[in-house]
Amino acid sequence: MRIENRFTVKLPVDETWKVLFDIEGITPCMPGAEIDEITDDGITGSVKIKLGAIRAHFKGTVAFTEMNEEANRMVLHAVGREAKGLGNATADVTVVLAPTDSGTDVSIDAEVMITGKIVQYGRGVIVDVSAKLIRQFVECLEERLAEECRSA
């Protein structure tokens, strides 16, 4: 399934890029996410998700498959397996930053494949929950970016 999100932050592209790559700094913005280790190859960790009555805890990795600062584009590949259960999740996520008069437009497009008990809720619920998680991430990210603006 494809999940698309767009938002604008009030910070120039180069500073937005720096904040997005402060992995430890922005992890608290991802609801339920925890980092176990950051290596040259990527990130290992886990994420806890609640979907209706179902709670899922995925453990996995995220690898940066493309990082093009000149084009303001990054691509991530995430793979996770449910800690308890038979579910799996994979995602290919493309993030593109574009300058605007008021800051930076951020585009996040993800192609997500999920198996296991979460699938019973259907695409609509999964997209709604994903959108809610992204909204929470964006609100937190905007706060961090505003802090960055104040300290600059």
Image: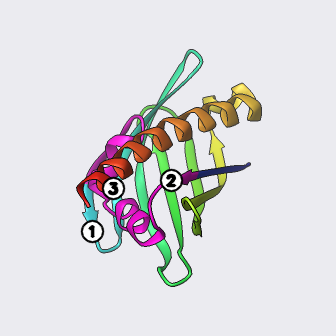
Residue 61 visible at all: yes
For residue 18, which numbered disc appears in the image?
none
Report the mark closest to the observer, 3 or 1.
3
Q: Residues within 10 Å of mark 3 (few under 14, many from 20)?
A: few
Task: Please state if 77 lies on the left or on the right of 24 as rendered.
Answer: right
Which residue lies under the disc numbered 2?
9
The three-letter amino acid code for the residue at tag 3 is: Cys
Report the mark closest to the observer, 2 or 1.
2
* Rendered position, 105 above or below 51: below
Q: Earlier in the sequence, mark 2 or mark 1?
A: 2
Which residue lies under the disc numbered 1?
39
Q: Position of residue 145 (x, y in %)?
A: 37, 52
Residue 12 magenta: yes
Q: Position of residue 39 (x, y in %)?
A: 27, 68
The three-letter amino acid code for the residue at tag 2 is: Val
Q: Which residue sits at x=41%, y=57%? A: 61
Q: Which residue is more in the foreground, 20 or 110?
A: 20
